[in-house]
Amino acid sequence: MNSVDQLFASDVFNDDVMQQRLPRDTYRLLKKTIDQGKRLDPQVASVVAHAMKEWAIDKGVTHYTHWFQPMTGVTAEKHDAFLTPVDQGKVIQSFSGKELVRGESDASSFPSGGLRSTFEARGYTAWDPTSYAFIKDHVLCIPTAFCSWGGEALDKKTPLLRSMEALSRQAVRVLKLFSRDASRVLPTVGPEQEYFLVDREMYLKRTDLIFTGRTLFGAKPPKGQELDDHYYGAIKPRVQAFMRDLNDELWKLGVLAKTEHNEVAPSQHELAPVFNVVNVAADHNQLTMEIMKKVAEEHGLVCLLAEKPFEGLNGSGKHNNWSMMTDTGYNLLEPGNSPYDSAQFLLFLCAVLRAVDDYQDLLRVSVSSAGNDHRLGANEAPPAIISIFLGTELTDILQAIESGTPYEGHGNEEMTVGVHALPKFPRDNTDRNRTSPFAFTGNKFEFRSLGSSASISDCNTVLNTIVAESLSIYADELEGAKDFQAALHDLIVREIKEHKRIIFNGNGYSQAWVEEARQRGLHNLPSTVDALPSLLDEKNIRLYEKHKIFSSAELHARYEIELEAYNKVLHIEADTMLTMARREIMPSVMRFAGSLAEGAGKIKAYAPSLTCTPQEKLLKKVTELLQEMDSAVDTLQQLISHVPASTVLEQSRYLHDQVIPAMSAVRAPADRLEEICDRSAWPFPTYADLLFDA
Ligand code: ADP
Ligand code: MG
């Protein structure tokens, strides 16, 4: 098989396979479940399970797994063979409807944030029939959600599915007002994934890469990304071979891998799929990250998904392109051609403005992690302040509507909602500001603050929920209106007035914006530790409870889990740093210093009249830096051994305020030592080795 047509989705139990393999009635009922979220009859599930098993066995599969996304942010699977013993030592291969629909899982070793002590330790996985089953490594994988027996979400998919329901419910209410006959609205997402590739041999010599996924030491190489010669540059043969295999693997799984190119930093690349319904997009993005790692190994490479693998070079993020689509295929963020379509577009646009303005903090929380703290606000990724870029044209139009004044680009006519159509927005006008965290790009919004390793479920759960909230408020208001047109116009004018502070088209990297944002009253939550407490703000708990996304207990659990994860990452990084400093860098530098002294001594013994100034100068510098490093190591050790036994938030705060600066203090002399020590004395590959070799 080499044609993409044949390869594509060849390992997926998709609609085609269902039609071929399922009895007609079963297919119809399953389709109803998939398209309309109807409950699946257990008997139908048995028939589906049988067909799935037969299909999988034909493809050499022996095991199945409920594939899920616990709070670790990576996927989890436990394989069970189809094998079942029957009489006289014989076996058959079976897979029941029950096994397809629900799995029992010991939840006790997954993060549960205290839900475990309150409720049962066991959890269960429940089939998500809207995401197709697939075969990976000879295992039939059933995409599932993971809950406790009490029904509390223990994963990232359950809240995402709940938020999709909430958004659909509210959006359909609003569409009814426009006499649209959509019965469901689906959030669509295309996540652009950035990553680094480094040589595996080199990688294995770096303790920091192995344990933390990013470098904790490393002097700047003579050349980094300053020449901008890597972005969109010709792809090296080894990387090209990797991309080819990666595409094949992803295509087999039905992942719509579409665009690939080199990114800004050396050895950095990007892959973008064609957008999909968000729960499928989330499953596919998890698969993409997993397969990237696997295929890289096959090519003697390692794929780094850390947000900031190399200091001084751009880190990796993920752009989350988000929109809403009706089940009839209409994109609700498409400005439309007629005045009526434009009015509807403006209402949905306002829903996003309001949502992002009222819940900036939740969006910020959804992208926060120890790794992403190194990127946000570092002039390579959006600032930590959340704002919306609309482009001048659309902003001018909103302004004209708000003030009831003529819009110049429109023949100097007054813009009245429902009476005038919006002009077309050429893509170029809307996609130029790369400094904005949340940009309108013609027919969708692009949320650019996500870290490269993040699960896209988190931010999309927030997006779906907060836009559902705006839409529910609009529907409440407009459903009772006597004159819909007039009420709509007034509502849009009011919403623009109340939420325009969130619109910012300027340079998000500038210091002036920080000040202006403060004056506008926007949140500025620079780090994970600053952001996470917002999760438990009363207004946020109310929002999540209203739309049945999270209970208060679930939110508290998530808050604990996120902070604990932050603390663990920092502990691991600090310990790794100490190990490398004490067992790798300092001994090597000491040996080097010793060799300098010895060499100088030999020269002097050979001819006392000769001077050894360069050796002595270097020796002095080296020993000074070694001294500095030694005391920084002691300080870091002291701090990490005395993390206060208090709340998890206080611990995070301590790690952020005390330990991170202490880590920088260890790194600084080490990086200067790297620059002056003999190349052969350095104990592990440098940035130059890692970045310019693959
Ligand atoms: P870029 O210039 O950022 O590469 P593209 O137009 O190629 O922009 O789109 C980037 C991503 O946005 C792709 O994954 C694409 O599939 C996705 N996308 C396009 N339309 C939509 C939509 N309506 N909803 C969600 N994502 C979309
Ligand atoms: Mg983009």
Image: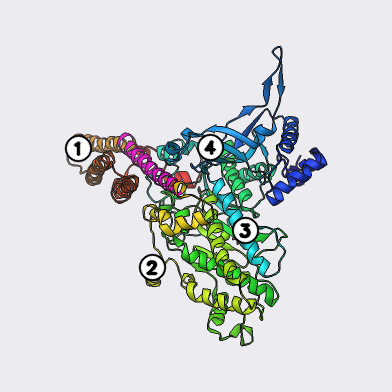
Which secondary structure class fits the magenta region best? helix
**Residue behind mark 1:** 604
Task: Please rate how many residues cluster around mark 4, counting C-alpha atoms within 10 Å: few if below 14, some from 14 to 19, many from 20.
Answer: some
> What number is the disc on residue 288?
none
Q: Position of residue 4 (x, y in %)?
A: 74, 46
Extreme-top residue of the structure: 88
- Quadrant position of ligand 2: bottom right
| Cα gap from disc 2 to disc 1, whole angstroms | 60 Å
**Residue behind mark 3:** 169
Task: Please rate how many residues cluster around mark 3, counting C-alpha atoms within 10 Å: few if below 14, some from 14 to 19, many from 20.
Answer: some
Q: Quadrant of residue 1?
A: top right
Q: Position of residue 593 (x, y in %)?
A: 26, 38
**Residue behind mark 2:** 514
Is 155 situated above or below 548? Answer: above
User: What residue do we see at 31% from left, 36% from top?
Assistant: 588
Q: Is residue 132 magenta?
A: no
In front: 14, or 40? 40
| Cα gap from disc 3 to disc 4, whole angstroms | 26 Å
In front: 339, or 663? 339
In contact (CB < 8 Å): disc 4 and disc 1: no
Q: Earlier in the sequence, mark 4 or mark 1?
A: 4
**Residue behind mark 4:** 149
* Numbered disc in front, either 2 or 4: 4
| Cα gap from disc 2 to disc 3, whole angstroms | 37 Å
